[in-house]
Amino acid sequence: MNSSEILLDVKNVAKSYGHVEAVKDVSFRVGKGRVVALLGDNGAGKSTLISLLSGVVKPDKGSLIWEGSPITLSSPQEAQAIGVATLFQNLALVDELSIARNMFLGREDAVTKGWGPFKRLDQKKLRQETEKAVAAMGLRLRSADDRVTALSGGQRQSVAISCAIHFSAKLLILDEPTAALSIRQQEQVLETIRNVRDRGVSVIFITHNIHHVKPVADDIVVLRGGKSIANFPIGEADPEHVSALIRGNEDPRH
């Protein structure tokens, strides 16, 4: 991968909380329009790494190179401004609001009309923009006015992904997006991720199960004990070998 093809280059990042080294030494690259599977068991450093990449915390050591230039992310807002969209497991969807209202939650100015005290939501534009965004992800919904509570787990994930990338995201970070979903719902989420990649958006898919990510991943990165211990293209990934690396049952040098 040459430099022009790299969106994000993570170099030897580390983060400690007091005497606890949550992330010790992690390095990997995310190519433009590629899906990187970040695999690790509980305690491997996945959650801290998400926080580092989404601007929640700063690394103590190492660097983040974004489109060829070093960056320092001081807040999630700064990460969003350069095009990093992060979906945590709780999804940040408001159940009692409609899909359309969730799409523009916190970004209402994009779908308002009028001025001053007469400003109000443009309901027609709100629905049209929402339907356009979810359709681009291959998702079929009965109505953009439906409440989020009416959606299945897979639909919720797909809607959340649509919301995250609608505002020109370049990198989508997904935290265990297929956890606790049925096989059918997992397939729906994987299809949404394929559509994201087809639009040229890069994805970091964080999980502990290679079988969940193998159908869509381009590259595999294995975390263990706060370190990145293996990094290879999906074509070289044997599921049993990767699972052994995650569990610590196999030396990454072999």
Image: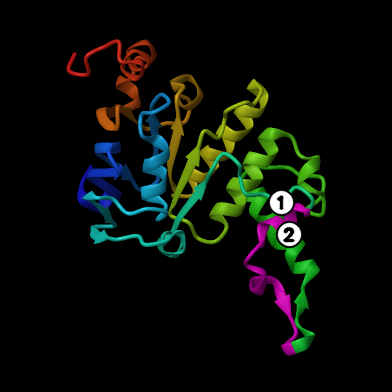
Q: Which mark is residue 94?
A: 1
Residue 101 numbered tag: 2
Q: Please, which residue is most extreme toward the front here?
A: 18
Q: Residue at x 53, y 43 (%)?
A: 88
- The amino acid at mark 1 is Val
| 47 left or right, relative to 128 | left
The crowding category of the residue bearing disc 1, from other C-alpha atoms within 10 Å (few below 14, some 14 to 19, many at least 20), is some
Question: Residue at left 23%, top 61%?
Answer: 69
Say whether marks 1 and 2 touch (CB < 8 Å).
yes
Instruction: Report x, y in % for residue 34.
Output: 39, 41
In this picture, residue 153 sits left or right of residue 150: left
Report which quarter residue 81 is drawn in.
Answer: bottom left
Stretch in magenta: 97-116
Residue at figure coordinates x 67%, y 24% from the top left: 184
Q: Is residue 6 visible?
A: no
- Please indicate whether residue 23 sits to the left or right of residue 50 in the image: left
x and y percentages locating residue 156 in the rendered image:
68, 41
| The one of 143 and 230 positioned closer to us in this rendering | 230
Task: Tell me what residue is drawn at x 66 percent, y 28 percent.
Answer: 185
| Mark 1 residue element | loop
Identify the mark nearer the N-term, 1 or 2.
1
Q: Amino acid at mark 2?
A: Arg
In the depicted structure, whether residue 147 falls above or below residue 168: above
Position of 34 relative to 65 (above/below):
above
